[in-house]
Amino acid sequence: KIPLTSIPGPSSIIPALQMSGIPINEFYFAGFFPKQKNQIENFIKEIENSNKTVVFFVSSHKIKTCLNNLAASIEKRLISVSKELTKLNEKVFVGTAKDLNEQIINQKENLKGEFVVVVEGKSHKKTDFINLADYRNEINLLLSKFSLTDVAEIVHKLSGIKKNKVYKWLLNIKSV
């Protein structure tokens, strides 16, 4: 039996989603990471095919298995692992599954606690096809109200174009 105090509650789902930096306009709560191999495979396939952000709980003794499976199947999507949310020792790790695997598994103190995992949904955005110059008026309007960094983030989120590429383009606009 698992003591009730060690089970993450609904109060940790929303903070995990908020701190993940992953779009949360639509999300799916998948419950707990499964125990058996065939259930794990089905669980990972469901996440792979989901267009929505997926959030689920993982126990400390299954976090390695979880991250290894995600790294093998979902290479390029953003993943957030929140540890001990709403507690004194809370930590949030964000990156690809491979990056997180290295950050979390290589430090033993990161393997203890309760975890909430958030996985970015499958994106249908086409990247780098947008000619940003076509939107110069709109971008100038954004630049008049927001910082360069904020506008780069907004354009990146809407277009899927890499943030550093957008930022460089915005710098060129500002200097003209």
Image (cartoon, grey):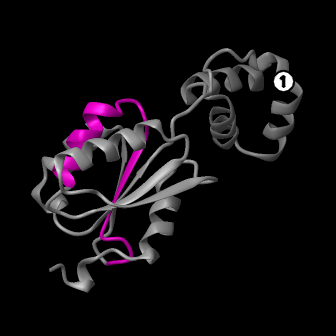
At 35% from the left and 34% from the top, the residue drawn is: 74
Q: Is residue 97 above or below residue 19?
A: above
Q: Is residue 65 magenta?
A: yes
Horizontal relation, residue 74 to residue 154: left or right? left
Q: Of the residues shown, which amino acid type is indicated by label 1?
A: Arg
Crowd around label 1: few <14 · some 14–19 · many ≥20 (10 Å):
few
The residue range painted magenta reads 63-87
Horizontal relation, residue 120 to residue 132: left or right? left
Q: Is residue 172 magenta?
A: no
Q: Position of residue 41 (x, y in %)?
A: 26, 41
Question: Residue 85: which quarter of the image?
Answer: bottom left
At 71% from the left and 19% from the top, the residue drawn is: 172
Q: Is residue 52 above or below residue 159?
A: below
At 58% from the left and 22% from the top, the residue drawn is: 165
Q: Position of residue 149 (x, y in %)?
A: 63, 40
At 55% from the left and 40% from the top, the residue drawn is: 51
Q: Nearer the viewer, residue 76 or 166?
A: 76
Q: Nearer the viewer, residue 25 or 175?
A: 25
Furthest toward the front, the residue is 38
Task: Quickly name the residue at label 1.
Answer: 136
The quadrant of the rendering that contains the N terminus is bottom left
Q: Position of residue 171 (x, y in %)?
A: 68, 25
